[in-house]
Image (cartoon, helix red, strand yellow):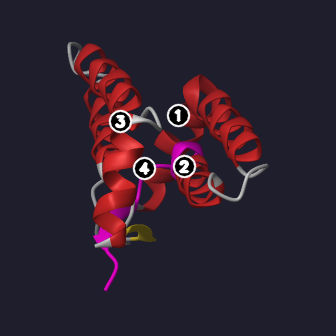
């Protein structure tokens, strides 16, 4: 019940819906080229998590597409192109939200996004019990 309430607040007041649309739009634009498709899929992964973050976690998955040596190369390209800037933005939001007690759960979600935004390849989103 609490997770559902936090997710609804995240979508409406917390800006999660707008951010998810931004990630989804970026994913669509990246998927317009064959070279950008792997990066677009990662943007969609971030958009999916942005929609309903409470009750989800990010885990390493050695069997996921984009893991292994190719995943390392793609993560480096992602980090240089958009990962660092996106992660810093999420860290800034987390610090801003952590100032108030009410904002702490939302700040923790932004920390989750910052970690995924740095190196998204080889990671999977799972439900938390």
Can you identify the residue that label 4 sits on? Answer: 70
Q: Are marks 2 and 1 in contact (CB under 8 Å)?
A: yes
Label 2 and label 4: CA atoms lie apart by: 13 Å
Look at the picture and state if 27 lies above or below 75. above
Calculate the distance from the C-alpha at mark 3 to the C-alpha at mark 2: 27 Å
State which region is magenta: 116-129
Label number found at residue 78: 1
Question: Is mark 3 in CB contact (under 8 Å) with mark 1?
Answer: no
Q: Quadrant of residue 54?
A: bottom left
Element type where label 1 sits in the image: helix
Between the C-alphas of marks 3 and 1, the distance is 29 Å
| Residue 32 place in picture, x, y as percent | 20, 13
Instruction: Answer whether residue 123 is magenta in the image.
Output: yes
Q: Which residue is mark 2?
A: 119
Is there a contact, CB below 8 Å, between mark 1 and mark 4?
no
Q: Are marks 3 and 2 in contact (CB under 8 Å)?
A: no
Label 2 vs label 4, nearer the camera: 2
Q: Say which residue label 3 marks.
A: 12
Q: Nearer the viewer, mark 3 or mark 1?
A: 3
Choose mark 1 or mark 4, whichever is in front: 1
**29 vs 103, nearest the viewer:** 103
Which residue lies at the image location 63% right of the left edge and 39% below the top edge?
A: 90
Q: Residue at x 59, y 45 (%)?
A: 118
Disc 1/disc 4 C-alpha distance (Å): 12 Å
Tell me the CA gap for discs 4 and 3: 37 Å
């Amino acid at each position: 019940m609490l997770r559902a309430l936090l997710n609804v607040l995240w979508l409406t007041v917390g800006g999660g819906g707008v951010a998810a649309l931004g990630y989804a739009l970026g994913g669509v634009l990246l998927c317009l080229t064959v070279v950008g498709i792997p990066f677009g899929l990662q943007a969609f992964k971030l958009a999916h998590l942005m929609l309903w973050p409470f009750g989800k976690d990010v885990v390493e998955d050695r069997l996921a597409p984009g893991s292994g040596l190719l995943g390392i190369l793609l993560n480096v390209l992602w980090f240089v192109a958009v990962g660092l800037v996106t992660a810093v933005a999420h860290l800034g939001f987390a610090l801003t939200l952590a100032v108030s007690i009410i904002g702490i759960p939302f700040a923790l979600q932004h920390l989750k996004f910052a970690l995924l935004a740095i190196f998204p390849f080889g990671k999977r989103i799972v439900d938390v019990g």
